[in-house]
Amino acid sequence: MPGNMFGDYIRQRRQDAWLTRTELAKKASLSVSLIEKIELGTRQPTLHTLQILFDHLDVAPMYRRHILELSLPGLLGPPMPSTPRQPEADDLAVLASLATPASFYTLPTFTIVAANAAHQALFPGLTAGTTFPEWLLLNPLAREIIVDWRLQARRCLHSIRQLSPNIATDPRVSAMVSACSHAPEWDELWNGSPVRNAGPELVIRDTAGRRSRRFRVGIYSPEYPQRAWWLCQLIPVGGAT
């Protein structure tokens, strides 16, 4: 229903987890009536109840602030002042100074805002203005570069579902979903069960040398002042194999 973005979001997350209201209530030690009121938008949850719901619906901690600011504006206090939506010279200098692959991206579509030279060399075609899901599902090189491609595609699409309180009313997400739906594996990946216990690592194959390298994925949200984008940095783990 219009104006009930958070309630719609909780209902969608519950349905994605294949839980009835009764099952979620039992799992989270909350009343069925409370969950119903939250989903219908007739009761605003407390921060304590929010944490319980997010925990039991497996909403990633790093996405929770974004979801709340989007669907329950003002709950966490007045918004922090932000910089322009595009990186300025100082931001780009910081990005370029990083020796490992790194990029700035925006939620909820994981759209690349800027990337350093190491990132561009590792992910050909994943340039500013491109969304990571579209590159991942529609660029044939992605299947060669990312060793565990299917796992990473499932993780990525699960993140999109977590980050989008109402996909139908967000034109950015709708456009991306429409484009990605042309991938042969779309239905399986989009409608499949969430990925559990997947660590924050990525195995990348050098298409020229055919050697693979493991990276730990570091995600950072600059706070002072708050930026409109996040920083993703890949940190090598061990040597090439």
Image: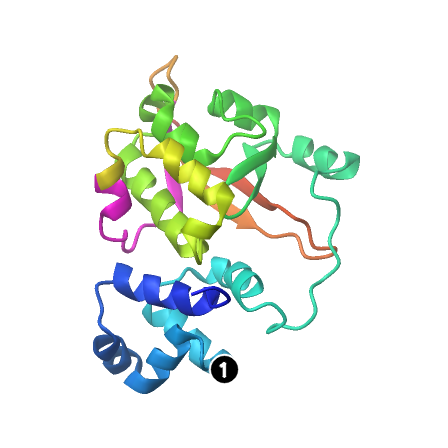
Residue at position x 32%, y 86% from top? 33
Q: What stretch is highlighted in magenta?
A: 188-205
Q: Is residue 30 visible?
A: no
Residue 225 percent across, percent down from the top left? 74, 55
Residue kind at label 1, given as amino acid type: Thr
Magenta segment includes 203: yes
Residue 93 percent across, percent down from the top left? 74, 33
| Camera-nearest residue between 21 and 238 | 21
| Camera-nearest residue between 35 and 4 | 4
- Coloring basis for residues: rainbow
Residue at position x 54%, y 32% from top? 101
Residue at position x 69%, y 64% from top? 79
| Camera-nearest residue between 115 and 112 | 112
Q: Is residue 56 visible?
A: yes
Residue wearing tag 1: 46
Residue 112 percent across, percent down from the top left? 56, 35
Magenta segment includes 32: no
Question: Which image quadrant is residue 26 in?
Answer: bottom left
Residue 18 percent across, percent down from the top left? 21, 63
User: Is 218 positioned to the left or the right of 153 in the image?
Assistant: right
Q: Relative to residue 73, is residue 241 depicted above or below?
A: above
Q: Relative to residue 31, is residue 79 depicted above or below?
A: above
Residue at position x 70%, y 38% from top? 86
